[in-house]
Image (cartoon, grey):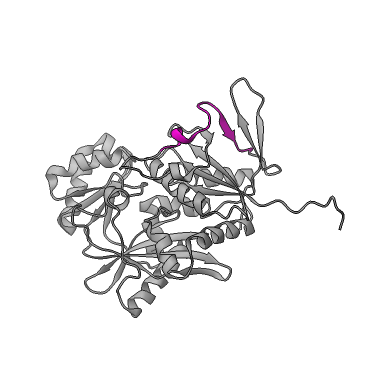
């Protein structure tokens, strides 16, 4: 071998986080955990944060600054290395060169990116928009593609797909933007009739949101308008669901070489100081789930089967967390899936896989390796 022969460079992983959605802070927290877990001997890492106004910024590689501290949520603006500079991903499949632009300065090449790890939650990141950009750029990425991301973000169409594949879903109603804006009385009547059929309380939520943000439990008609406006602060389309009485069970799905496999399930116990498992309970008060869920072998096998079916129904890739209710009759009803579930230190997805024999660093590595073996485009 020639003395001048260079060893192959390490794959370069761009961890993209933050974003324009109301889940910005949780995305930062999640990315911090992933940055801590990526094997730096195996990969080069490029952290890229998207500010709340949509600017792509080169950020400090500082996971310790990306956690929730004293109930204060982190944000990309505090991590950005420049107040004006922007990171540009070329929309050109022949080049994966990432460039940093600063006002009045010559653009700086940051090197090629081999794979993107999009740690974005909610609209403008988890909903197929970023995935479409990466497809145009020809850059492989972790997680679901354009269609699966879009369906997985929109709870209405998610439920429609689940129903078509025979997955059991609970009663729901959709109020579209035009309905509420043009005739709120008719929209309100629609919800009241839904409540007459299925009973109070109801849950009013953004149709395309996550992290339990914008959700209100409504006990009667008096709280309905306020709940609708709260949901519409996050999404002009809202979803109304009836209360399903049962145990909350979650199950993770992960892509292996031979196809998707399900983790041991977890149970989210009832929270005593919150109306439901809301944002505060999940991320601030550190509510903890029970892993594995004490539901018995038969129920465990069934929820694992349904979780993989949900993954396949939406054409997911990489990973998914599927959330269910186990009713008093012993039946499972699927609530929703998350195509990019949280990876915070208290998140259920990594905890379920830890219990299933896949450590946190191995989980991150598997997701990156799976993305590196996939091409962009039709597949």
Q: Position of residue 84 (x, y in %)?
A: 52, 26
Residue 76 lies, with reference to residue 360, above or below; the image says above
Q: Quick check: 175 left or right of 255?
A: left
| Residue at image point 40% right, 65% down | 352
| Residue 285 against residue 252 in the figure, above or below | above
Quadrant housing residue 324: bottom left
Q: Which residues are magenta?
A: 75-90
Which residue is painted at 50% across and 39% down in the image?
A: 49
Horizontally, is 244 left or right of 334 in the view? left
Instruction: For the N terminus, give its image quadrant.
Output: bottom right
- Most extreme residue toward the top is 104
- Residue 84 is a magenta residue: yes
Res. 54 visible in picture: yes
* Count of marks placed on residues: 0
**Which residue is situated farthest in the right direction here?**
2
Residue at point 39% right, 50% down? 154
Q: Position of residue 364 (x, y in %)?
A: 52, 58
Quadrant position of the C terminus in the picture: bottom right
Quarter-of-image position of residue 355: bottom left
Residue 66 position in % (x across, y down): 43, 43
Res 316 visible: no
Query: In front here: 340 or 156?
Result: 340
Q: Horizontal placement of 65 versus 187: left or right?
A: right
Left or right of 77: which side holds 287? left
67 in the magenta segment: no
Question: Where residue 371 sits: x, y (%)?
Answer: 59, 56
Q: Nearer the viewer, residue 324 or 309?
A: 324
């Amino acid at each position: 071998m020639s003395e001048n022969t260079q060893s192959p460079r390490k794959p370069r992983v761009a961890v993209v986080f933050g974003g324009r959605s109301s889940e910005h802070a949780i995305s930062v927290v999640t990315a911090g955990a992933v940055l801590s877990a990526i094997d730096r001997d195996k990969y080069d890492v490029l952290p890229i944060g998207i500010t709340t106004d949509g600017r792509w910024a080169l950020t400090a590689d500082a996971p310790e600054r990306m956690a929730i501290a004293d109930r204060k949520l982190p944000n990309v603006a505090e991590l950005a290395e420049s107040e004006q500079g922007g990171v540009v991903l070329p929309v050109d499949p022949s080049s994966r060169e990432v460039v940093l632009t600063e006002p009045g300065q010559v653009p700086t090449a940051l090197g090629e990116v081999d794979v993107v790890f999009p740690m974005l939650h909610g609209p403008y990141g988890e909903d197929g928009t970023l995935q479409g950009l990466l497809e145009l750029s020809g850059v492989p990425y972790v997680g679901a593609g354009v269609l699966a991301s879009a369906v997985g973000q929109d709870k209405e169409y998610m439920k429609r797909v689940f129903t078509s594949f025979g997955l059991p879903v609970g009663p729901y109603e959709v109020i579209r933007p035009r309905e509420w804006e043009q005739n709120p009385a008719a929209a309100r009547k629609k919800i009241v009739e839904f409540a007459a059929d299925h009973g109070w309380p109801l849950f009013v939520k953004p149709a395309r949101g996550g992290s339990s943000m914008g959700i209100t439990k409504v006990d009667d008609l008096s709280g309905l308008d306020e709940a609708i406006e709260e949901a519409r602060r996050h999404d002009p389309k809202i979803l109304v669901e009836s209360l399903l009485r049962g145990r909350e069970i979650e199950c993770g799905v992960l892509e292996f070489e031979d196809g998707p496999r399900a983790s041991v399930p977890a149970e989210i116990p009832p929270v005593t100081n919150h109306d439901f498992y809301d944002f505060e309970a999940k991320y601030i008060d550190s509510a903890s789930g029970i892993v594995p869920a004490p539901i018995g072998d038969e129920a465990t096998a069934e929820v694992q089967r349904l979780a993989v079916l949900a993954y396949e129904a939406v054409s997911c890739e990489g990973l998914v967390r599927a959330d269910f209710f186990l009713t008093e009759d012993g039946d499972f009803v699927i609530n929703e899936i998350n195509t990019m579930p949280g990876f915070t230190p208290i998140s259920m997805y990594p905890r379920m896989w830890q219990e299933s024999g896949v450590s946190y660093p191995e989980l991150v590595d598997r997701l990156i390796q799976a993305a590196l073996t996939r091409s962009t485009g039709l597949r």
